[in-house]
Image: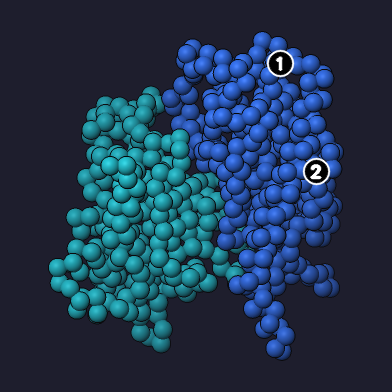
Amino acid sequence: MPREAEPSLNERQFVLKALEENLRLDGRTFDKYRALALTFGDEYGVADVTLGRTRVLAKTSAEVTVPYADRPLDGIFTITTELSPMASPAFEINRPTETEILLSRLLEKTVRRSGAMDTESLCLVAGQKCWSVRVDVHVLSHDGNLTDAACFAVVAALRHFRKPDTSMEGGVLTVYTPAEREPVPLSWLHSPFCITWCFFGDEGQMALLDATWSEEQVRVGSCTISLNRHGEICQIAKLGGTPVEAVALLQCTNVALTKAKEFSTYLDKKLAEDAKRRDKDGLMAELSAENDR
Amino acid sequence: MTTKREPEAALSVLPKSDGSARYSYAGYTVTASVNGPIEAQRRDEHAYEAHVDVIVRPAAGVGGTRERHLETILQASLIQLILVKNFPRSLIQIVLQVEASPENDYVNTKLMQASLNSAVIPALLQTAVLALLSAAIPMRATATSAIVAVMTQDGASRLVAHPSPREIEAAQSVHVLAFTSQDGLLLAESEGDFTVKEWDDVYDTAKKICCKSGATKGEGIEMVLDEQEDSGPDMRQFLRSALETKVAADLHWK
């Protein structure tokens, strides 16, 4: 597979010199995100997130399986990130790149390890049956800041998702199809969001939010902060790169909190809109049928 | 459960790839990206022609045997369309991402299924052709595809074009056919029990759906009239109009 073209010296200088003059190539201020758009699919649990020219699709699915032997009371929750050649021909199928591994680890830490979803509620019969919820992250177009977009998509998809309803009667487990019973949402505890800062300059003195691909290629370091709207930090990842002043990091965390709040409000708004849309054509009709009886 | 609505297509939806398309019809939504001609890997390099790499990615779960099978079917068809001899030692990479497939509310879907899902082939092929056109890859012809199911009811068989998942489940046999823009048969995949007579009927129906526009233009109204019951849109006309819209939008500045 062809390697991703590295930016030329001219391009590199252009981006850096502009940043020194407090300018970004797309005219944004340093702490501004590109336009964020979220659309839900017709099915439950599909979220399509566009952040500028970056586009990520997350799809949630659930099926009944046997729980892990060492965790009989927990359900299974996995997040799969596989970068296909659709994002860039440099990505190869079945050969994970560094980007892909870092992305999946970060999502794992942010969403799964922070206990965003109550995995115990996925248990159906202790040690025998449980739900296995998986989120597939598909990167359709990669123009920088994959982490934030992917994390937002995963959280949105999981919150939108409905799993089939079940019941236990006399030791017999019944899984109802969508035609029989309206599917139920997952038990969701909090919504963490990733906010990535990129550092530029010799001492990493310039910090940028939501870097594009061309900016990401010339950065000297980056720091991903995952937190929810209550300001509870799930993780901070600063993987190598130029050291950054502690005070500057504190400043970054404060801004990250306001951004997490914005994300949260936006997601809540979109979920409410979607619920309203579904209510109009499907659910209401079903409810009225019940009343007729 | 699926609503029989018109097919929809958008071209060049992904900014980073050479060509891309998003196509949705009969509950299926597929996004495709095409990169090419690009440098081929040593093992894929062919001295006289381009290597066409088709990658099918399911919406949920990792691709398995079923996706590999779909890839071989599509690759064999697309090689016939693309002028591969024009690009020796290079690679044309087609990535097809299934975004949504029609839901069957009466069964809980299993994630991993080994059986062939032929209903997705028309959507995949149509998207691939649109993406190739968007990437301006030289082609011999374009292609249109249709799926026809043979249903048996009270001893009499009935043909259903673009069946829903429930109809496919109940069908006696399911056939996927694709035709080139020169009315040549490109692909024929069949599943189930059927007779030669039934297959001939299926062939005629599919050909009508795939190659209609050429015939109706000259002969006028009576052709349209006796095809009223024949469900399914005119695929070739659809392909043409999708591209016309795109070209008109691109040349808007002129």
Q: Is residue A5 above or below residue B199?
A: above
The quarter of the picture where the N terminus of chain A appears is: top left
Local SS, label 1: loop
Residue A137 in view, yes or no: no
Give the color of chain A as drawn: blue
Which residue sits at x=74%, y=49%?
A: A265
Q: Nearer the viewer, residue A28 or B34?
A: A28
Q: Name which residue type carries label 2.
A: Arg
Q: Name which residue type carries label 1.
A: Gln
Give the color of chain B as drawn: cyan
Q: Which x, y percent locates residue A75? A: 78, 52
Q: Residues within 10 Å of mark 2 (few under 14, many from 20)?
A: many
The quarter of the picture where the C terminus of chain A appears is: bottom right
Q: Chain of mark 1?
A: A
Q: Is residue B136 above or below residue B236?
A: above
Name the residue carrying label 1.
Answer: A205
User: Could you tell whether A39 is left or right of B213 in the image?
Assistant: right
Q: Which x, y percent locates residue B136? A: 30, 39
Tag shown at residue A229: 2
Residue B240 in view, yes or no: yes
